[in-house]
Image (tube, rainbow, N blue to C red):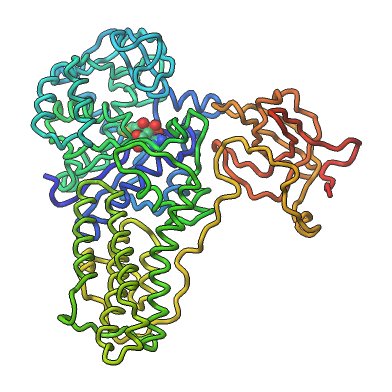
Amino acid sequence: MGDACWYVTTPIYYPSADLHIGHAYTTVAADALSRYHRLKGQDVLFVTGTDEHGQKIERSAADEGVAPPAFVDRVVARIRDELWPALGVSHDRFIRTTDEDHVAVVQAIFQRLRDQGDIYFGTYEGWYCLPDESFWPDSRVHGGACPECGRPVERVQQPSYFFRLSRYQDRLRQHLLAHPDFVQPPTRLNEMINFIEQGLEDLSVSRAGVGWGVPVPGDPEHTIYVWFDALINYLTAAGYLSDSDRFQAAWPPDVQLMGKEIVRFHAVTWPIMLMALDLPLPRRVFGHGWLLIGETKIGKSLGHVIDPIQLVAKYGVDPVRYFLLREVPFGADGTYTEEALVRRTNVDLANDLGNLLHRTIAMVRRFNDGFVPPFRPGIEEPVLELVAADVRREVEDSLEAVELNRAVEAVGRLVRAANKFIEERQPWALFREPGARERLDNVLYSVLESLRVASVLLSPLLLDTPGRIRRQLGIADGVTRWEEAAWGKLPVGHHLDEGTPLFPRLEAAAEEISAAAPAPAAVSEAPTVSLDEFQRLDLRVARVEAAERVAGTDRLLKLTLSLGDSTRTVVSGIAQHYHAEALVGRLVVVVANLASVTLRGIVSEGMVLAASEGGQLALVGPLDAVPLGARVQ
Ligand code: ME8
């Protein structure tokens, strides 16, 4: 089973709010692996999607006063139609747990496990962590806090169906010991073995009071526990019970990627579900680390989300993909800063790679009239050829081992070796040296060829950059096979046009993309602006018609503003200074031509002006009566 098709999954994400850079991290990693295996000529099944049922989504929808189906449709559309396309995510199936085929598979599995005695009816009494959607027995909860995330847990007592985890505990332990690669990295394997050795209690797999879920077959008072429903997505998407050819080819998954906080579900509950269904277990469950801001995990409910769509709009997709794949050793935690993204782009992409391409084409134009010179083997040691072969092997090994940062780093090694080679061989000196023509040709060819090989090795990782390098090298932009990474495939004799810079050097971001409060600007250090520049701002008087706290944040208010003949929505970080109700009817000044941004799923179409200093903040408005919409200048 499963050899014909390489199968990779990401978690299916909760569409309780817009996704952030943490979700992009896992998904871009899965995308890079998928692209690599496709280039290797394998059929690939890459599945991502959304986990739409359960109490958490039910509550998020209720907070917005929307029915769950309409709520999830809206958030899912942004994920599927905007976020993943912006990042070039090439999934083969975007699965929603509300998809009909999935609901049918969940119910069929539940029924089968009940029929075979693996699911039984009883009473659950214990704790529930709503943000994690996870049950905890008394023995693991201390002081009312979730042992996983530390947030408060709720007491639950209800009739419930249970899944007999305990029956499979020893078999699972044996499997983990016999397959040390099953859970990666190795530290997570040890955590899981410890967890199992503490003893597994049967798992509650239904909720009595939660209406938004898959009904238990024959007992619609109960809905199926959201994690039981969610894990089954990996089976549905592979064609389980619907497309036996696809399922035969794809099952089991080759790599299942996720953040470390949900490895427990994937290394304990999930394999036991598969054992009960007599199905082979995934080959690898990989729990990567977290992207942090400062010391805290970036998270939907923790208030600081970085919107990847905005990052892509600001920097382009490849700098964002590059940063995500390169910055943090896959498996470890790492810090996100926009400054680090800018630094990576400038140093690795603009300086090392971009300059190499630019200077090489310039030298070919100066020293060989722009024609790609021939290569004559045997004149000198094949320095770059050896590095390229070694780097290619390292990229392959790293991608097989899901060490994405190491793969990206390896390509950087080839680029730096080519830059160093130019410094050492000094083509400008060879050009003047009588009798050095062949050596000069070889140097130029070797560097061009290294760039071509780099473009192949980068093509699973980045989107447009490989094609842009290749166009400048005068070859087809699409890479179709991984074998193109072999040395010596650059055709000779064609003419190269003048190059254009691959990556403009970025300035450090003046305004970071984040939900953090802007730092107050020092009064005297602002640069001078001309009247023209000032007048580019369209400042208008507006009245607050409605104001409400944005669910799940301490800082944000959603304001509805009237500008006389139009209204608009603005999200403003002033909730710690103003009560929503107290603002209604007040006059403010709004920047009316500011590019809109999406904050917490709300499109904010402007910014209200406020003065702040030393922790105090006051909104700014007209001192005397003027019509709404009046221009401030
Ligand atoms: O857990 N750093 O969904 P979710 C790195 N629906 N990765 C991060 C991250 C961060 N700061 N924040 C999120 C769920 N992620 C369930 C999964 S699967 C059957 C059900 C990524 O929306 C990481 O992959 O909370 C993490 O495991 C996942 O998003 C959690 O997404």
Classify residue 393 as left or right of residue 366. Answer: left
Does 19 appear above or below 548? Answer: below
Classify residue 12 as left or right of residue 303. Answer: left
Residue 96 place in picture, x, y as percent: 37, 38
Picture residue at 60% right of the left edge, 47% below the top: 511
Q: Is residue 124 visible?
A: yes
- The quadrant of the picture occupied by the N terminus is top left
Picture residue at 62% right of the left edge, 31% below the top: 556
Does 450 appear above or below 593? Answer: below
Picture residue at 27% right of the left edge, 15% below the top: 161
Q: Is residue 103 visible?
A: no
557 or 190, which lies in front? 190
Residue 252 place in picture, x, y as percent: 17, 41
Picture residue at 59% right of the left edge, 26% below the top: 554
Residue placed farthest to the right in the image?
Answer: 624
Residue 238 place in picture, x, y as percent: 23, 43
503 or 210, which lies in front? 503
Image-quadrant location for residue 212: top left
Residue 58 place in picture, x, y as percent: 46, 25
Does 116 appear above or below 158? Answer: below
443 or 63, which lies in front? 443
Does 507 appear above or below 272? Answer: below
Residue placed farthest to the bottom in the image?
Answer: 434
Q: Quadrant of ligand 1?
A: top left
Classify residue 471 as left or right of residue 529. Answer: left
